[in-house]
Image: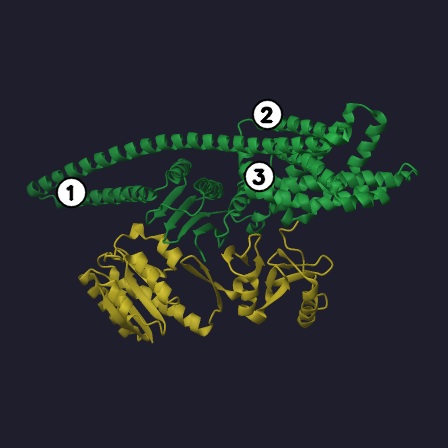
């Protein structure tokens, strides 16, 4: 059962949203239920239970003392890191990207008269779709926290972790990005276990991302980037090489951008 | 040692060793000046230095034969400074004059401190005894001074605010004049070094003290000068910023007043029309017009509200300048600052430099695409400051290579930005930066503050 929470301080709009959601759930027979619908952020937080999958519909222009849309979303994120945030706004042009990037908001719904119901229905469909795919093939993720922002990096995207030049900093390399965060390779290694190999004091490499091993130079390539190999890691790497059991395991063609 | 003459090649090796030691000490003093980072990254870059030593030894020997006995011999060490300078230009990616200034400064420290440490070491009783027994070891004993130099250099690195020398060299009005002045100062210290062989033993302590005092005074004076120049520059820039700011605020205020008046008139007109005329079509189209106008006004006000949330004048000025540069070049800009930004947990000038680099990169990359746009988000929370800049890019280079210092596609200036950016962040243990290049959107993020 997926629980929906709704917070909008405009009574009439909230009623309409509630009705639209309930209608869509009924028609499509979704396994969803509205658990809380309120105009007061404090009440939502009181009733919040992060025991299952929750979806929150929050008003961007919420004004209630200490709370506004962003701060409420952030507090919900803090209490329920896996909750899905959907924002409802009166000003389509001004949809705040900060919400999207910092809180990983799932969707924006604009309160256009006459279009609100359709947008809500579409949003629920997209939501159902996403939850379904996640259920079918759960994606393992690695959470990275910087300040109040929490990012989930799918494990399958990670090439390797590397200790950064600055103490306590770790660089996470993926195919499409590079993140710097505070942490230690030892902890990450203990956390992630088998899928990654500590090839060097400063490198923790995803086994399935290794493309090329050059024992003579003491380096390997993952995602086209060079990582170091320590003496201690050689046996494990050789074992891996034998497991992959190709006649010439480490002579993939050089990547195009290497000159 | 005079009893027997060592073979020529051994003596040559000794000269080599002497040079190598000198260069190592110079390197030790150079590192705190320029930052140790590039060397730690690529220790292989040290290799040319070791080649410099035999080259210098050979030059020494040749010079001995050619200009034996003249005072010119003492200036040979300036030759190694030149070699060092070229090496530093490559490793730290600075200009020749910047590099020469830094190397001269380090060379000056090397000359005077190695003079002092060598004499102090020589005065130690057990070393005295050792030298009496094995005079051929006297050169090797000098290696013992290395840890001492290391400690001194660490101390200097602590005392000088990090990066101030580099910042000074970057900002100084005439790098050539600074470099030449420092070079002559170093030449003077080389002479001071040579004088030790002519000083009578009983005056040696005084000589050493004078050397030490001179060195320390010079360093303190230089540092004071650097600080002053930096401060002055900051004041100038600040005045400039304030002027710019006032200009901007005035224009914004007048714009706002004008628009408000216009809207007021228009509304009155509309109501009058609606009362008299039955032409509903006219009313509708007028209303549509007004809505459109409202929306645009809202956007404008939105932007000004966002800018208004940025309470740090230096950043505001930079951002305004860059945003207007972008819109001039046809880049659609979007700025989002939801909450007031008053604190960034970094030196503001450092952050301004970072922001400038990131915005320049975004501008350049966006211009290469068909529909250039750029989006800037700033967010200050209780304990952190977050900055995000995104832009489209062509995706024709491998972003992973961006951070390696040798990377560049369009001349030496490009790609340097990110390197400098990384160097600035080195100073802040709790600043984290991320980049991603999903699809054709390039994103740079920076978070500073109390992250732990």
Q: Position of residue A199 (x, y in %)?
A: 64, 63
What residue would you read off at disc 2?
A: B177
Other residues around mark 3 within 10 Å, as few (<14) / some (14–19) / many (≥20): few
Q: Position of residue B39 (x, y in %)?
A: 64, 46
Q: Position of residue B51 (x, y in %)?
A: 76, 41
What residue would you read off at disc 1?
A: B282
What residue would you read off at disc 3?
A: B410
Supply the letter of whichever chain is yellow: A
Find the distance from the CA under tag 1 to the CA under tag 2: 73 Å
* Circle 1 chain: B
Circle 1/circle 2 CB separation < 8 Å: no
Report whether mark 1 lies on the same chain as mark 2: yes
Does dot 3 land on a helix, a strand or a loop? loop
* Circle 2 chain: B
Q: Colour of chain B?
A: green
> In the image, which is nearer the foreground, mark 1 or mark 3?
3
Circle 2/circle 3 CB separation < 8 Å: no
- Between B185 and B203, the one lying in front of the other is B203
The tag earlier along the polypeptide, 2 or 3, is: 2
Q: Position of residue A98 (x, y in %)?
A: 36, 53
- Between A164 and B299, the one lying in front of the other is A164
The tag earlier along the polypeptide, 1 or 3, is: 1
The single residue placed furthest to the left in the displayed view is: B276
- Between B82 and A22, the one lying in front of the other is B82
- Between B425 and A172, the one lying in front of the other is B425
The single residue placed furthest to the top in the displayed view is: B70
> In the image, which is nearer the foreground, mark 2 or mark 3?
2
Does dot 2 land on a helix, a strand or a loop? helix
Residue B342: quarter of image? top left
């Amino acid at each position: 059962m997926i629980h929906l929470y709704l917070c909008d301080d405009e009574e009439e709009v909230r009623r309409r949203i509630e009705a639209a959601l309930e209608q869509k759930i009924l028609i499509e027979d979704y396994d969803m239920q509205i658990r809380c619908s309120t105009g007061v952020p404090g009440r939502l937080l009181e009733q919040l239970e992060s025991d299952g999958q929750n979806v929150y519909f929050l008003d961007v222009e919420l004004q209630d003392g200490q709370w506004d849309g962003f701060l409420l979303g952030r507090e919900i994120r803090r209490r329920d890191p896996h909750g899905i945030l959907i924002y409802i706004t009166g000003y389509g042009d001004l949809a705040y990207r900060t919400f999207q990037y910092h809180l990983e908001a799932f969707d924006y719904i604009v309160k256009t008269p006459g279009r609100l119901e359709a947008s809500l229905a579409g949003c629920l469909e997209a939501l159902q779709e996403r939850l379904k795919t996640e259920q079918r093939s759960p994606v393992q993720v690695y959470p990275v926290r910087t300040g109040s922002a929490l990012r989930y990096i799918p494990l399958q995207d990670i090439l390797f972790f590397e200790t950064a030049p600055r103490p306590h900093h770790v660089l996470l390399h993926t195919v499409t990005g590079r993140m710097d965060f505070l942490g230690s390779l030892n902890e990450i290694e203990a956390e992630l276990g088998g899928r990654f190999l500590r090839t060097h004091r400063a490198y923790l490499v995803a086994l399935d991302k290794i493309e090329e091993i050059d024992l003579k130079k003491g380096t390997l390539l993952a995602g086209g980037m060079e990582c170091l190999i320590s003496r201690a890691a050689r046996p494990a790497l050789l074992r891996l090489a034998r497991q992959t059991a190709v006649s010439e395991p480490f002579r993939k063609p050089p990547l195009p951008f290497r000159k | 040692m005079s009893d027997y003459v060592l073979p020529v090649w051994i003596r040559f090796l000794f000269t080599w060793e002497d040079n190598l030691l000198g260069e190592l000490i110079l390197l030790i003093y150079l590192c705190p000046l320029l930052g140790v980072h590039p060397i730690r990254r690529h220790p292989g870059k040290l290799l040319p230095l070791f080649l410099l030593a035999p080259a210098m030894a050979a030059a020494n020997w040749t010079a001995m034969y050619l200009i034996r006995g003249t005072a010119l011999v003492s200036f040979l060490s300036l030759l190694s400074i030149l070699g060092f300078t070229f090496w530093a230009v490559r490793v730290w990616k600075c200009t020749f004059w910047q590099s020469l200034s830094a190397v001269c400064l380090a060379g000056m420290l090397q000359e005077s401190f190695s003079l002092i440490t060598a004499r102090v070491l020589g005065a130690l009783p057990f070393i005295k005894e050792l030298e009496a027994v094995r005079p051929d070891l006297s050169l090797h004993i000098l290696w013992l001074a290395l840890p001492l130099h290391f400690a001194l250099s660490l101390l200097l690195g602590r005392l000088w605010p990090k990066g101030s020398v580099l910042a000074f060299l970057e900002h100084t009005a005439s790098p050539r004049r600074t470099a030449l002045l420092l070079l002559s100062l170093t030449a003077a210290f080389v002479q001071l070094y040579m004088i030790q062989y002519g000083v009578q033993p009983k005056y040696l302590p005084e000589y050493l003290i004078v050397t030490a005092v001179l060195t320390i005074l010079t360093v303190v004076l230089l540092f004071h000068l650097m600080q002053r120049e930096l401060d002055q520059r900051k004041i100038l820039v600040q005045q400039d910023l304030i002027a710019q700011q006032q200009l901007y605020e005035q224009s914004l205020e007048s714009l706002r007043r004008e628009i408000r008046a216009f809207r007021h008139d228009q509304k009155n007109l509309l109501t009058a029309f609606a009362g008299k005329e039955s032409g509903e079509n006219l009313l509708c189209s007028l209303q549509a017009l007004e809505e459109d106008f409202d929306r645009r006004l809202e956007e404008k006000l939105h932007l000004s509200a966002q800018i208004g949330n940025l309470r740090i004048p230096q950043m505001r000025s930079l951002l305004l300048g860059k945003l207007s540069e972008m819109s001039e070049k046809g880049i659609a800009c979007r700025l989002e600052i939801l909450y007031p930004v008053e604190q960034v947990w970094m030196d503001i000038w450092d952050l301004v430099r970072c922001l400038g680099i990131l915005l320049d990169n975004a501008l350049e990359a966006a211009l290469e695409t068909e529909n250039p746009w750029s989006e800037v988000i700033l967010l200050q929370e209780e304990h952190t400051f977050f900055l995000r800049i995104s832009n489209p890019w062509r995706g024709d280079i491998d972003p992973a290579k961006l951070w390696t210092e040798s990377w560049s596609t369009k001349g030496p200036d490009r790609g340097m930005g990110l390197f400098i950016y990384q160097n600035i962040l080195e100073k802040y243990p709790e600043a984290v930066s991320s980049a991603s290049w999903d699809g054709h959107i390039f994103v740079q993020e920076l978070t500073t503050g109390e992250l732990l």
